Image: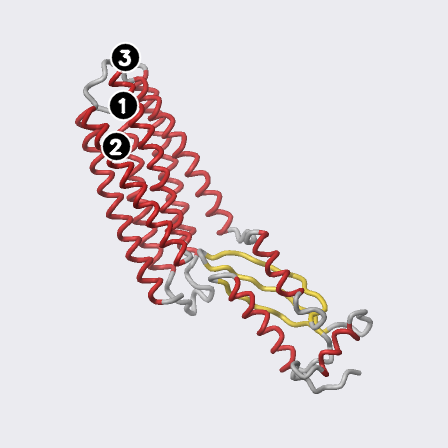
């Protein structure tokens, strides 16, 4: 990864933490003054964003460390481990919000003046949307799944903040706070749903689930474009380690090719795949075809091709 991209990612991560702290302090302090459960639930959600952004920042610093003797595949799975803790905290927060919303709904009381709260939530919505779009842009430029996930939290905060604004306006007009409590429960359900998605994605990566099928189709296309030099391939395995995609497979080529020729072909395919798929590491094992291989005759023609570099006559 380029140094400029790493610097850009770290600056964006620090900015994300600062924005989350500002939003959470603003919403929680206003919610406590106005005794608004909807605002408080949104503030707690922002506090979770502080935790998520901080974990992302720390994880990002660790995950970009180069491989060493104890971690030959690098430190990318730090991101996945950190995501599990994010899911745990989000799930607990969601349950607490739902429980508090149900408890408050049992008590009927008049709504206070929510004018200041409405203003704070409108400002929070605008800031959350701006921060989310900025993180999404940088995440796409640097191919950072952590920043893209972080941007998702801020963009979704825009929708939850808008929901709280609507609830506060209805409470102000109707004079009752039941709408405030309903929004708190809905936000709690949304937080739990988000926690489940993060948990599933993290466990998939930790259990070495294969990378998406569309990427595997691209790998297949690249390999087949080298036919008939490549007779077949098998035992392709793919997995993720943080943002790093690890790919290994077996290629079968003409048994009469010399070592230099076989290496040239596999090296070219590895570079093609790594150029197409960002943050990928490809390892190819070469196998010779058997004597009865029906494609051997066609594959061995390339030994005499001027561009092949081969000079060994087939048997």
Q: Which mark is residue 168?
A: 1
Which of the two discs, 1 and 3, labels the residue nearer the N terminus? 3
Density class for disc 2 (Cα within 10 Å; few <14, some 14-19, many ≥20) is many
Q: Does the residue at mark 1 contact the one at mark 2 (Cβ under 8 Å)? A: yes
Above or below, comparing residue 116 to residue 79 in the picture: above
Which of the two discs, 3 and 2, labels the residue nearer the N terminus? 3
From the image, tell me which residue sits under label 2: 121
Density class for disc 1 (Cα within 10 Å; few <14, some 14-19, many ≥20) is many
Where's the C terminus, which quadrant? bottom right
Instruction: Residue at 30%, 46% (x, y): give it.
Output: 131
Which of the two discs, 1 and 2, labels the residue nearer the N terminus? 2
From the image, tell me which residue sits under label 3: 108
Instruction: Residue at 45%, 57% (x, y): give it.
Output: 243
Q: Disc 1 and disc 3: Cα gap in Å?
A: 16 Å
Q: Quadrant of residue 180?
A: top left
Q: Is residue 24 left or right of residue 262?
A: left
């Amino acid at each position: 990864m380029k140094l400029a991209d790493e610097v850009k990612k770290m600056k964006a991560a620090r900015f994300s933490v600062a924005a989350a702290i500002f939003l959470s302090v603003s919403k929680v302090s206003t919610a406590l003054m106005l005794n608004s459960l909807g605002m408080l639930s949104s503030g707690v959600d922002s506090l979770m964003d502080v935790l998520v952004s901080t974990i992302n920042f720390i994880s990002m610093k660790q995950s970009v460390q180069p491989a060493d003797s104890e971690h030959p595949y690098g430190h990318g799975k730090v991101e996945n481990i950190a995501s599990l803790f994010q899911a745990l905290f989000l799930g607990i927060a969601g349950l607490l919000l739902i429980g508090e919303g149900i408890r408050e709904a049992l008590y009927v009381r008049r709504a206070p003046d929510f004018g200041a709260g409405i203003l704070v939530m409108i400002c929070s919505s605008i800031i959350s949307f701006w921060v989310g779009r900025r993180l999404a842009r940088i995440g796409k430029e640097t191919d950072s799944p952590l920043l893209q996930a972080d941007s998702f939290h801020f963009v979704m905060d825009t929708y939850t903040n808008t929901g709280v604004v609507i609830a506060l306006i209805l409470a102000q007009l109707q004079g009752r706070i039941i709408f405030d409590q309903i929004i708190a429960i809905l936000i709690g359900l949304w937080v739990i749903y988000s926690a489940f998605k993060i948990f599933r994605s993290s466990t998939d990566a930790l259990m070495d689930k294969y990378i998406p099928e569309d990427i595997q189709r691209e790998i297949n296309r690249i390999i087949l474009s080298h036919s008939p030099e490549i007779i077949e391939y098998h035992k392709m395995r793919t997995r993720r380690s943080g943002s790093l995609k690890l790919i290994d497979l077996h290629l079968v080529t003409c048994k009469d090719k010399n070592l230099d020729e076989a290496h040239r072909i596999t090296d070219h395919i590895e570079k093609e795949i790594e150029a197409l798929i960002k943050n990928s590491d490809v390892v190819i094992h070469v196998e010779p075809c058997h004597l009865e291989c029906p494609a051997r005759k066609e594959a061995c023609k390339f030994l005499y091709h001027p561009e092949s570099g081969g000079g060994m006559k087939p048997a």
